Image (cartoon, grey):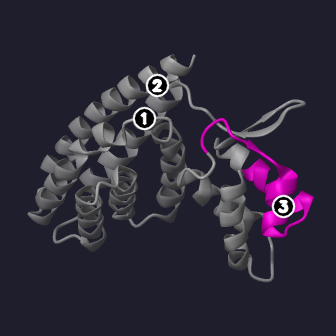
Amino acid sequence: MAEQLTGLADDRALLGRTSTAERVSDILRSRIAEGYFPPGTRLSEDSIGGALGVSRNTLRESFRLLTHERLLVHELNRGVFVRVLTVEDVEDIYRTRSLVECAVVRGLGEPPYPLDGLAEAVEDGRRSAREGDWKGVGTANIHFHRELVALAGSERTDELMRSVFAELRLAFHVVDDPRRLHEPYIARNAEILATLESGEREKAARLLAVYLENSLKRVVEVYLRRVGDEA
């Protein structure tokens, strides 16, 4: 926990002069997504509030916001914890992803499409793989799908999927073999990108649907094995 708190102290400057609960939530959401606070971690009000220099009321409001986003859970007489997803949670996340992401691709207008963000995410994934940074590959993969959703040009859709992707990272942080989980999707992201570059949105949507179906099976497989080992 000491290392995590040191990182939070560095984030203190991000709060500026107005230490709102929303800004604290943004910082904690990012730290949870990055794995600084793994699933099951109890979050100490005193330690985190001290590291960020915010009041207990502000911190509690930020906890409430993140609980609403299903990233945290409050346990009576025990405190606030980073949520541990169930398999049913993972399946629901992928159901939502399939509904939204495939609809975004099918709803694209006439090409060419603004694909610079997707191309950057693909290259980030390749670079992380060359460096053996498999968690970095996972981050690049999430970046790819956020950029894909952003093609819809909808702030509401972006906001919805930001929460969904943050939840998905909770499952990724439980997995003990990130290379096995993320490596296959470097090439598949590149394939979807190339298909969109050629203007074939229906083909890209079909590739994406199969991609998400395969990804769900892989995540559930490794997730069940890890959770089962710890049961």
Q: Name the residue at the front extreme.
A: 2
Q: Looking at numbered disc 2 in the image, what kind of residue is underneath it?
A: Arg
> Would residue 121 be visible to someone looking at this image?
yes
Q: Nearer the viewer, residue 201 or 22?
A: 22
Residue drawn at the location 73% of the way across and 39% of the way down? 81
Residue drawn at the location 25% of the way across and 64% of the way down? 127
Magenta-drawn segment: 38-65
- Residue 18 position, x and y percent, is 81, 78
SS at mark 1 in the image: loop
Q: Is residue 221 magenta?
A: no
- Say if 162 sits above or below 81 in the image: below
Q: Looking at numbered disc 3 in the image, what kind of residue is underneath it?
A: Gly
Query: Mark 2–mark 3 contact, CB under 8 Å?
Result: no
- Residue 123 position, x and y percent, is 23, 66
Q: Looking at numbered disc 1 in the image, what kind of residue is underneath it?
A: Asp
User: What residue sits right under mark 3 in the picture?
Assistant: 49
SS at mark 3 in the image: helix
User: What residue sits right under mark 2 in the picture?
Assistant: 226
- Say if 93 sits above or below 115 in the image: above
Q: Is residue 45 magenta?
A: yes
- Say if 187 sits above or below 123 in the image: above
Q: Nearer the viewer, residue 2 or 98?
A: 2
Q: Quadrant of residue 167?
A: top right
Residue drawn at the location 78% of the way across and 48% of the way down? 64
- Say if 15 sits above or below 100 in the image: below
- Residue 158 position, x and y percent, is 48, 59
Q: Count residues near mark 2 (Cα–Cα under 10 Å), then give few for <14, some for 14-19, many for 20+.
A: some
Query: Mark 1–mark 2 contact, CB under 8 Å?
Result: yes
Looking at the image, is mark 2 or mark 3 earlier in the sequence? 3
Mark nearer the viewer, 1 or 3: 1
